[in-house]
């Protein structure tokens, strides 16, 4: 009797959880907009973000793990898009174009593994250190970006 009652319930819970995971996996992750611009200021505002991206892109090209991904990228456009994105997620006055491609589409077909994602975060941390961005601010930004791995990592 107990089995009869609990089995369908269990199956329903599993089906619901699977459906929820599916929806979660397909809904683009939108980082929460910070309540104020303190994080943006900690990154030095627009000029600070521009310096950071100049440095980051140089480091990505110098890193043997990252170079194959970025060697043929449109670098000025990439920097511009990253400045805009970091400005937005740090509470700055920018908004990514609503018509711009989502993170899943941008990275589609690039065969990015979790290890590649972690390597990029490592290089980003080196660039943030080099720019003298306080550790707490670095972490606040990484918390905003980390959930994007679900859309960016597309290879096991
Ligand atoms: C938190 C992690 C990441 C964020 C926030 C991010 C963000 C972005 C953004 C905003 C763009 C520009 C899109 C546009 O032009 O509108 C981009 C492009 C690109 N991303 Fe990522 N990305 C991340 C991780 C990665 C990883 C792990 C790789 C590869 C290992 C990667 C490879 C690329 C490449 C190659 C492009 C340039 C595509 C092109 O211009 O042809 N990204 N990314």
Image: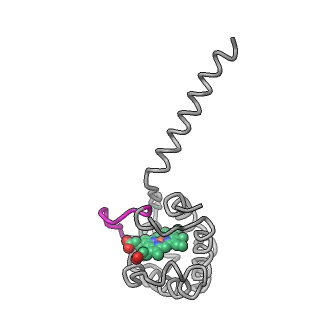
Image location (x, y in percent) of residue 17: 56, 37
Q: Is residue 28 left or right of residue 99?
A: right
Q: Is residue 134 left or right of residue 35?
A: right
Q: State the quadrant of the C terminus.
A: bottom right
Visible in this render: residue 39?
no
Q: State the quadrant of the N terminus.
A: top right
Tell me how many marks there are.
0
Front residue of 79 and 156: 156
Q: Residue furthest left?
A: 99
Does 96 sit above or below residue 10? below
> Which residue appears at 53% of the width and 57% of the height?
150
Image location (x, y in percent) of residue 117: 58, 69
> Which residue appears at 44% of the width and 57% of the height?
30
Q: Residue furthest top?
A: 1
Visible in this render: residue 106?
yes
Examine the image and state in which quarter residue 129 appears: bottom right
Image location (x, y in percent) of residue 25: 49, 50
Q: Is residue 100 magenta?
A: yes
Does 20 sit above or below residue 146? above
Does 31 sit above or below residue 57? above
Q: Main secondary structure of the magenta part?
A: loop
Q: Which residues are magenta?
A: 93-104
Examine the image and state in which quarter residue 15 appears: top right
> Which residue appears at 57% of the width and 88% of the height?
62
Front residue of 17 and 47: 17
> Which residue appears at 40% of the width and 63% of the height?
105
Q: Is residue 120 magenta?
A: no
Examine the image and state in which quarter residue 92 appears: bottom left
Q: Residue furthest right?
A: 2
Front residue of 146 and 143: 146
Image location (x, y in percent) of residue 72: 43, 83
């Amino acid at each position: 009797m107990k089995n009869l009652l609990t089995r369908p319930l269990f199956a329903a819970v599993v089906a619901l959880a699977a459906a929820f995971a599916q929806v979660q996996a397909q809904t683009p992750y939108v980082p929460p907009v910070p309540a104020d611009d303190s994080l943006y200021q900690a990154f030095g505002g627009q000029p600070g973000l521009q310096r950071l991206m100049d440095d980051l892109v140089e480091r990505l090209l110098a890193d043997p793990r990252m170079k194959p991904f970025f060697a043929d990228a449109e670098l000025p456009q990439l920097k511009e898009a990253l400045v805009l994105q970091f400005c937005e997620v740090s509470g700055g006055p920018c908004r990514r174009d609503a018509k711009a491609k989502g993170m899943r589409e941008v990275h589609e077909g690039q065969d990015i593994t979790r290890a590649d994602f972690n390597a990029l975060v490592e290089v980003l941390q080196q660039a943030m250190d080099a720019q003298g961005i306080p550790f707490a601010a670095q972490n606040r930004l990484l918390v905003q970006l980390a959930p994007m791995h679900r859309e960016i990592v597309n290879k096991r």
